[in-house]
Image (cartoon, rainbow, N blue to C red):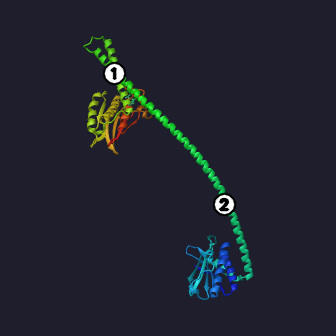
Amino acid sequence: MTAALLHMALRVEQDIFVVRQRGREVAAAVGLEHQDQVRIATALSEVARDLLRGTGGADVIFAVVTTADGRSHLRVDLVPVAPLPDGRYEPQSGAVARLVDTLSVVAGTEDTVVRMSRRVPLTAQTLTPERLAELRATLERTAPGTAEEELATQNAQLVTALDEVRSQRDELARLNEELEQTNQGVMALYHQLTDELEETNRGVVALYAELDEKSAQLRAASESKSRFLANVSHELRAPVTAVIGLARLLADSASDPLTAEQARQVGLIRSSASDLLALVNELLDLAKAESGRIEPNWAEVDLRALFGQLRGTLRAVRTEDEVELVVEDPPAPASLRSDEVLLAQVLRNLLHNGLKFTASGEVRLRAERRDGHWWLSVSDTGPGIAPELHERIFEEFYQVPGATRVNGTGLGLPYARRLVTLLGGTLELTSEPGRGSTFTVSLPVGGA
Ligand code: ADP
C-alpha cells in the first residue's frame, strides 16, 4: 500500500534547501530517528543538486509504502523534468547511496524516476491511514523556511554529529581499556588454572605409581601364598597317604588281631587321615588353579555324554533316600568348545554340594542354550543361602555356620569358580533361605 504524503517541485537552486528541509520534516513525521532524518535529508539534497544540474529540475514525491508483512518504508521519488542522460543516474558522491537503504533508477509511468527509500523502525510502525492523513495535512500547512534557516539547521546538525563522533571515540577508547584489563585478568586466570592442572596431574601420576607398586606387592603376596599352599600340600600328601596305608594294614585280617577298642581307634585314624588327604588334594588343586598352572585342554565337548557320565557317577554318591537326582537331557546340538575334565569337575562339585546339603526333594542339572552361551544350572530344594553370604561362600575355607556345615573343607566353590573363569565363563548363585539354591555356570558356546 502506498500513501503519498507531500508533493513539491525542484526548479531553482533555492529549492534544494527546501527539499532538504522538507525531507527532514517528513522523516521526523513518519518516526525516523534523528540520525536517520539527517541522513535522508542529506541524501535528498545531494540527489536534488545532481538532477537540477543534469536535467533542469524534478518533481519530488514523498510517500509511505507498507508491504504485505506490515513493514513501512519512507519512499522519495524524484521525477526529472527532462529525460536522464542515457536513462541512467549515478550520484556525484558515491557515499550518498550509503545514507539510505535503497537508491536506484526505476521506470516510472511516463519517465524514469530516481527512487530512494529508508525503513521506518518497528517502534514507529503505527502509520495507520488516519495518522498518514493527519501527517499529510500538517505538512501542507507548514510553510518551508528560508535558505538561511536551513543553513543554520544544517550547521547545528553538523555540530551534533561531530559531538557524537567525539563521544563515540571516547567510548571506544574506554572500551579498549576495559578489554585490555579483562584480557589481563583472563590471562592471569589461565596461568593459575594451568598451574593447578599441572599440580593435580603430578598428584595423579604419583598416585598411579603408588597403585602400581601396591598391585605388584599384592600379586607377589598372592603368588607366594599359592606357592606355599602348593608346596605344603604336596609335601603333606605322601605322609598322609602312608598313614592311611598303615592304618589299613593294621586293620587287615592278615595282621595280628586287634581288640575291639583298637579296631575302633584305627578306624578313626583312617577316616581322619582320609579327610586330611581330601583337604590336601583340594588345596593342591586350588593352588594350581590360582597360580595359572592349569592349562585347559580345549576340545569339542558333547554335553549329552558328559551329563550321562555325571548321572552315572553321582547316583552312587547319593546319600538321602528322599532326594532325587534329576539330570535333564541337554537340547541338541549339545556341544561346546571347552575342557571336558575341568567342566565335569565343576558340575560334579556343584551336584555333590546339592546332594550333600539337601534333605528332601530333588537336585536337578539342566542345560539351556541362549545368547551364544550355554547356561548349565544345578538347582536343589535344600536350605538355601542368605543373600549376604552369596559372595562369601566363594571365599576359601568359608562355610555357612549351622546345619549345612557338614564334612567339607570350604574349598570346593572357590575352586569351581576358578575353573569356570579359566574356561572363559562365570559361576553365579541365586538362592534364598528356605527356597533352595541354583548355581549357574555360563560358558560361551565357542570357548574362551
Ligand atoms: P564345602 O562344601 O566343602 O563346605 P564349598 O566351597 O563347596 O565347601 O561350599 C562352601 C559352603 O557353601 C558350604 O559349606 C555350605 O555352607 C554352602 N553351600 C554350598 N553349596 C550349597 C547348597 N547347595 N546349599 C546350601 N548351602 C551350600
Label 1 beta carbon within 8 A of ligand 1: no
Residue at left offset 53%, top offset 39%: 207
* Residue 119 rendering spot, x and y as whole percentages: 61, 74
Give the distance between the C-alpha atoms of the residues marked 1 and 2, in whole angstroms: 93 Å
* Residue at image coords 29%, 17%: 248
Q: Quadrant of residue 447?
A: top left
Q: Name the secondary structure under disc 1.
A: helix
Q: Give the answer, above or below, for where 54 lies relative to 98.
A: below
Disc assigned to residue 82: none
Rendered location of residue 153, percent (x, y):
73, 77
What type is the residue that disc 1 sits on? Ala
Task: Pick the residue in front: 346 or 213.
Answer: 213
Quarter of the view holding residue 21? bottom right
**As drawn, is 403 to the left or to the right of 165?**
left
Percent position (x, y) of residue 164?
70, 69
Q: Earlier in the sequence, mark 1 or mark 2?
A: 2
User: How dense is the environment of label 2, judged by Cα within 10 Å: few (below 14), some, or many (20 and up)?
Assistant: few
The quadrant of the image that shows the C terminus is top left
Q: Is residue 251 left or right of residue 162?
A: left
**From the image, which quarter does the N terminus lie in?**
bottom right
- The kind of residue on which mark 2 rests is Asn
**Which residue is painted at 56% across and 76% down in the image?**
67
Residue 52 in picture, x, y percent from top left: 65, 86
Between 12 and 352, which is closer to the camera in this rendering? 12
Residue density around tag 1, few if under 14, some if 14–19, many if 20 or more, within 10 Å: few
Residue bearing the label numbered 1: 238
Under circle 2, the secondary element is helix
User: Is residue 88 visible to the viewer in this orientation of the structure?
Assistant: yes
Which label was assigned to residue 176?
A: 2
